[in-house]
Amino acid sequence: MKNPRHSFIFVSASLHYLPTSMADVMSMEDIQATAARLNVDLDSLDLDSVRLPAGETFGVISDDDDLKKEEDFEFEEGFGNIIVVDNLPVVPKEKFEKLEGVVRKIYSQIGVIKEGGLWMPTDPDTGKTQGYCFIEYNTPQEAELAKEKTHGYKLDRSHIFSVNMFDEIEKFLKVPEEWAPPESKPYTPGENLQKWLMDEKARDQFVIRAGSDTEVLWNDARQSKPELVYKRSYWTESFVQWSPLGTYLATVHRQGAAVWGGATTFNRLMRYQHSQVKLIDFSPGERFLVTYSSQEPSNPRDTHRVVINIFDVRSGKVMRDFKGSADEFAIGGTGGVSGVSWPVFRWGGGREDKYFARIGKNAVSVYETETFGLIDKKSIKVENVIDFSWSPTDSILALFVPELGGGNQPARVSLVQIPSKQELRQKNLFSVSDCKLYWQSNGEYLAVKVERYTKTKKSTYTGFELFRIKERDIPIEVLELENKNDKIIAFAWEPKGHRFAVIHGDNPRPDVSFYSMRSGTNTGRVSKLTTLKGKQANALFWSPGGRFIILAGLKGFNGQLEFYNVDELETMAQAEHFMATDVEWDPTGSYDSIMRYCVTAVTSVHEMENGFNVWSFNGKLLYRILKDHFFQFLWRPRPPSFLTAEKEEEIAKNLKKYSKKYEAEDQDVSMLLSEQDREKRKALKEEWARWISEWKRLHEEEKLERQKLRDGEASDEEEEYEAKEVEVEELLDVSEEVISFD
């Protein structure tokens, strides 16, 4: 063989997956015994042609090792770019070239096979192929893609390819012939990861990133400042992210991701190996973590190579991986990198994490987490589907298909039950330019924002199709704005409620309208509550418990804020956080009706005024923190309450009784703060007195100097001075002129 590395591989192949590493040097007797057991004729092998792969010794000491000790060599490690294809047809010599041509045609479509990189061993006695081959690509990425694409490939009824990475063969050979039970380890209890929820002051935590530091802090609004919990420099290489229930804090690194937990210590709980990871996403119930990476192709004309892993959060095990070109993952969605929408997979089934789905070409693939395979082993075929969205609480998919055939086939929105794949409801839509799907947090309503063309096709107007999911036959109601030509700037459902808000009109002062899915005693009809005219707002932020909303003017509106009570339809406060980029409500209202705080932040997209402000729910500024190079602010989410709906309602009715205890605590804190303020003012007054005393001492010491400068005048009192007027004559200029008397 021309390539020494190939020579070693081919000899190993002749031994049919002989282990590629040995802990000890084998004697000749051992070699002969192993060859006899494997029916290998050593006389037919040219042992002089065997070469060890670069960087491997297999326990054999080289005669010139002492000459190389001081040299620093770099070797190519492993065989990550080689695959083993099994279950090939066994053919005689006459059909060898034909079979080799078929295999080469299949695998050269996936990547570049090295010269001499396809080797199909044959039986030395019969000349027949042995049913497997080795293929060496230019890069490990191409080899991994070939495995992903062709494992299970059906050449014919009798030959279904089984493809493995060459590096995995040794692992398979190490499997013991007899099963042995795993060694049991004694249980050691870990830290209570929910301990932070038992804070005596009922405070919330948040994480911030500024510069190279990441900090977790308590929001201590009573003290008008945060309290540090944990701080670490270079904790992450790009960003941090809380898990949906607040149990874990995830960090991102070049080698992969990691999760940390606790109330104060934040120990690392698990690592997830994924080189060059760029994005992560948790499942709603925190059972799984999705990681994403993309690599530039060896051929500039190709798209990025994408790798997505789904890990079990607790064990760190890869439950399923997906690999392919960026084009395969670029359909649907709005965010992401390298043309790929993010998140690629969207989770369904509520916090049970039962299903996850992705959109593909003319199909939606729905997987179940019990087997991590497709439901019924096939995708849902939907011609030209471009968007889908899960109900937040039920296993229902909403699908959007645009118009086809120049409008001959209308656009449509369909509701599909999972896992039965039964279509629950469908609505055809005509003259559609675009659609957006908005689920209410309890899954009771679905709003479809529909942009339609006018008759002239030169402009569009917007309306809403409102689905009542929980009602019989899922009735649909159409809502159009009073002015159809108004541009829709923002839409938002009230969490856990029946109301929604819409910003519509033209900048810089659009209108804000509030609607209810109930009309008086008629709970089956939408009605408008009010319209606020001419507001400097382009974003809506409902409190997690509903009732309150912030009308925010971000970016070009320079941080205008209006705190609005939707129950009373009145403005509670108007404020400004100049250049604000983010608004975040604290999570306390997510599972009760008590709202406390919200935060506005200016991140490093602006060079000035970086930091965050903490506000009360009714718009009172509580404290402000400035941070240079401020990147992130994230409240720590709270898990659902264990209280029943009846118990929560009973607490809400008797809130005054329960609040007496906390009002007393608030009063104590207020008195303490007042005492601290008094002590502070007293200290400032004493400092001022000391400064005055020191000034008088210096003034007295300099008295003689001042007297000297005043020509002997001793007094410093101005009223003891006598004013004198002194006239001084000064010759300014002299000129002579000769006058002629002629």
Image (cartoon, rainbow, N blue to C red):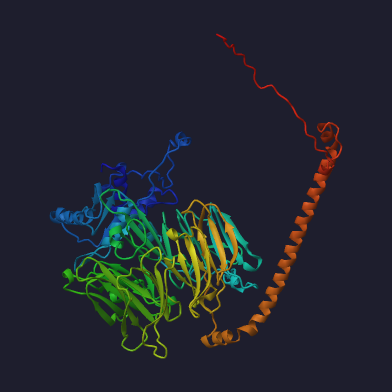
Identify the image quadrant of the C terminus.
top right
Residue 609: x, y in percent?
A: 53, 54
Please identify the residue farthest to the front as the structure is shown: 742
Left or right: residue 608 compared with residue 662: left
Q: Residue furthest top?
A: 742
- Left or right of residue 354, residue 103 in this image: left
Residue at 59% from the left image edge and 57% from the top image edge? 231
* Most foreground residue, 327 or 4: 327
User: Closest to the observer: 396 or 471?
Assistant: 471
Q: Left or right: where does residue 690 sit relative to residue 442?
A: right
**On the image, which quarter does residue 379 sit in?**
bottom left
Residue 427 coordinates in the image, percent (x, y): 26, 79
Quadrant where the image shows the N terminus: top left
Residue 214: image location, x then y, percent: 55, 57
Q: Position of residue 506 (x, y in %)?
A: 36, 65
Q: Is residue 55 above or below residue 105?
A: above
> Where on the picture, by quarter, is residue 149?
bottom left
